[in-house]
Amino acid sequence: MFGFDSFELNKIAGAVLGTLLATFGLSLLAGSIYAPHRPEKPAFAVAVAEAPATAAPAAAQTKPIAELLKTASAEKGQAVAKGCAACHDLTNANTNKVGPGLWNVVDRMIASHPGFAYSDAMKAKSSEKWTYDHLNGFLHNPKGYVPGTKMTYAGVTRDDQRADLIAYLRSLSDNPQPLPASQ
C-alpha cells in the first residue's frame, strides 16, 4: 500500500510505544526525586470568622431608612429603577414578569402579588409587610436578607441610591404611604 511491510509498521509502533513508556517512566522518577514535602503543621493558621446565618445582619449593616429617606429623591430613584424594570412591571398595570409587579409595593404583604410563584423562603415571610425597613434590607442584599429568594439581583449597596429607589417605589401608588418617622 505505502511501500511498508508489516515489519516496518511494527518498528514504528514499537518506537511510539517505547517513547510513551520512557516519558511516563521519567515523569514517575522526577516526581519521586522532586516530591514536595508538606509540613505536618501549617506555618501559620488563618482564622476566619463565620457570618451568622440570620437575615438580621444584612439590615443591621445599613443605615436607618428614616434617615436615608430625608434626603432621597424619587426622580433619582426612577433612574435606579430602570434596572428593576427588566424583571418587574413598574406601572399601575402591575403585571407579573420575571418578578412580581411593584405598583403599591410599599406596605403590601410580602409574597402576596396575585399570580406570582414566590420561593418558599419568600412565602415564609408572607405574614409580614414590605415596610420601609424590609425594603431597605432586601434591596441592600436580597440573597442575604431572604436566603433562598428567587431574585438574582445582587442588591443596591449605596445607601443614597437605595433610598432614592425606595422613594421612587413609594411614589408608585395612587395613595403613597407616609414616610417613616425619624428616631
Image (tube, helix red, strand yellow):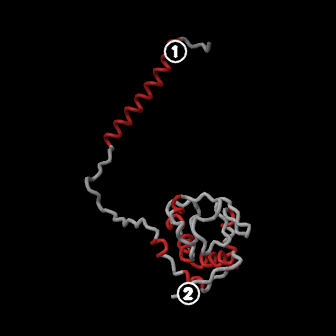
Whole-percent x and y of residue 82?
A: 69, 69
Taking 172 as reference, is 115 above or below it? above
Mark 1, residues whose alpha carbon is within 10 Å: few (<14), some, or many (≥20)?
few
Apparent side of residue 12 relative to residue 96 in the rendered image (left or right): left
Task: Using the image as rendered, state which of residue 95 and residue 71 is in the foreground.
Answer: 95
Mark 2, residues whose alpha carbon is within 10 Å: few (<14), some, or many (≥20)?
few
- Which residue in the rendered view is the most extreme toward the bottom? 183
Does the residue at mark 1 contact the one at mark 2 (Cβ under 8 Å)? Answer: no
Residue at image mark 2:
181
- Which residue in the rendered view is the most extreme toward the left? 40
**Residue 8 badge:** 1
Residue 111 is drawn in which quadrant? bottom right
Taking 61 as reference, is 146 above or below it? above
Whole-percent x and y of residue 94?
A: 70, 66
Task: Using the image as rendered, state which of residue 102 and residue 65 is in the foreground.
Answer: 102
Whole-percent x and y of residue 29?
A: 34, 36
Give me the residue at 67% from left, 77% from top.
168
Apparent side of residue 78 relative to residue 64 in the rendered image (left or right): right
Q: How far, Cα to Cα, is label 1 from label 2?
A: 94 Å
Q: Amino acid at mark 2?
A: Ala
Taking 43 as reference, is 73 above or below it? below
Label 2: element kind: loop
Residue 33 is drawn in which quadrant? top left
Q: Amino acid at mark 1?
A: Glu
